[in-house]
Amino acid sequence: MTDRWTRAEERYRQNAERRYRRDDLDWADADDHEDDTTVIPRYTDDDEQFAEDDGRYAGHGTYVDYDDEYEEEPAPRRRAARPAAEPTGRERVGRSRSGGRGSGRGSRAKSRVASRKAAERKRRRRNMFVIAGVFVVLFVGAAGFAAMKLMNRFTPPEDFAAGELGPLAIVQVKDGDTATQIAKSMYDKGVVASSGAFYEAAVKNSGMNSVQPGYYSIATHSPAAEAVTALVGKDSRVGNVVISAGRQLHDSADVQTDAPKHGIYRKIAEASCVGTGATAKCVTYEQLNQAGTTADLTALGVPTWAMDRVKNVPDPSRRLEGLITAGTLDFDPTGSPEQILRQLITESAARYEATGLLQSGKANGLQPYDTLIAASLVEREAKPNDMSKVARVIVNRLAVDQPLQFDSTVNYTLDKTEVATTDADRARKNPWNTYAMAGLPATPISSPSLEAMKAMENPAAGPWLYFVTVDKQGTTLFTEDYNEHLRNIKKAQDSGILDSGR
């Protein structure tokens, strides 16, 4: 039995050495190569066991040599000692694993594998610490935010106490502003101590629903409730000017009543005042007239389609006539006279252009500035329902080079005006009197409404060359026949509408 075991182990050893043999060069480069022959498989018994009591080998091994014709019988529980010169196959294998050339390579490979696994475990632990740290930060931040919100719920926003107010500030409310945006503007201007305080007061005041875009004068250091009350009140709005259709730049008076007719410059000056009494700050009529007469036209915002004609106006004090449209306009009252005029002219030009002014030449044959001039005549000569017909009369007369002969153009240069004009007035020669010359006046004679602009941009179809208003109700008769026109004038005279006050 022992001999068979010895021979079997000898054959196994020879096969193992032949199978796993390497020359010295291969072993020398062992650290640079890694393959599946670096570790010799360990021979193990099929039924290997370890005793539970003391951990010593307590089973039996069965070695099967498929080149032999036998199968070794089970070994006894304790084998007899063998001579030291003849180690067992298991001892040879053990020695090869622990002390041979292959054993060093196998140990290093195992060491590298173990190192990689250790590094991977370390990396995983580090990642877990990082993730845990992120969660901690997020949790602390969320908890702090929630605590802050909870505190703010019970802590009212900062507000000024009632007492002495600060100087006035100008706050702009833009079109489409919400209560939140207005609150921010109030805070930025120093009117209120916090936007939150203003917002809370604003949502309690139903008057906020009627606040219009524009500029408002409100005292700084105001308690929020007082600031809201001032905003919705009638006295805080500044820089808001309403220009009636047909109004001129300069003041004039009515011939019959001597009642003053405030011009556009006067209306702007009145709307520019911030404060009341001796402390009020305003731009003056004279300052606006001076700026309109002498300031650089580009700085004043004159549009490109009017620039060349405005440069050549015979009377510079009238060069901005018609460039400020009729209607409601807002401007910053803290600006200089030049800045105020620029803001108003720029806004007016945009409104004119929105009506189709720049494309109107296809329908009326006029340049944009000429269309503006003609629209100012329509405004002063016609009622709204007759505007497109009067516009056609203008176009038809210009086409045949016939003088327009509008009384409104005679009145334009007079200090005192009326519907009827005198022969002497009509005989005055100036760049605006259409009795004394053919064609259009040098400038608009008033600020036209957008309705007059649209009528002039798209005149009604018709052959009319003449028209006259025949009664105080505004009835206007149109004709292409001059004799019929004379009969219509007689009707106007009979009604008294053409009676002069001079």
Image: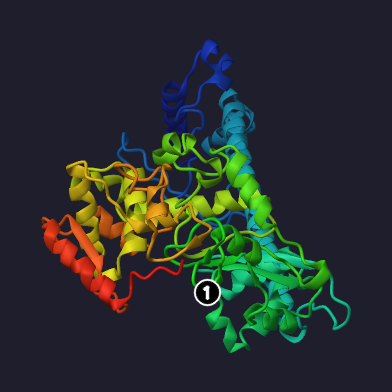
Q: How many labels, in total?
A: 1
Q: Is residue 42 above or below residue 212?
A: above
Q: Is residue 490 above or below residue 86?
A: below
Which residue ends up furthest to the top in the rendered image? 25
Q: Is residue 32 left or right of residue 431?
A: right
- Classify mark 1: helix, strand or loop: loop
Q: How did the renderer colour the structure?
A: rainbow
Relative to 310, say whether 491 is above or below. Answer: below
Q: Residue at x 20, y 48 (%)?
A: 397
Image position, residue 283 (x, y; %) = 70, 57
Q: Is residue 107 visible?
A: yes
Which residue: 62% across, 36% down?
A: 111
Above or below 157: residue 414: above
Which residue is pictured at 58% across the width and 46% down the height? 292
Front residue of 246 and 328: 246
User: Residue 185 location in percent, x, y?
Assistant: 66, 66
The outermost residue toward the right is 164
Q: Quadrant of the N terminus?
A: top left
Badge 1: residue crowd in 10 Å (few <14, some 14–19, many ≥20): few
Residue at (18% x, 62% y) in the render: 486
The image position of residue 291, as x and y in percent, is 63, 45
Quadrant of the rendered image containing residue 215: bottom right
Residue at numbered disc 1:
257
In the rendered image, residue 188, in percent from the top left (x then y), is placed at 72, 63
Residue toward you, 191 or 435 = 435
| Residue in front for this viewpoint, 406 or 152 | 406
404 and 125: which one is in front? 404
Q: What's the residue type where badge 1 is placed? A: Thr
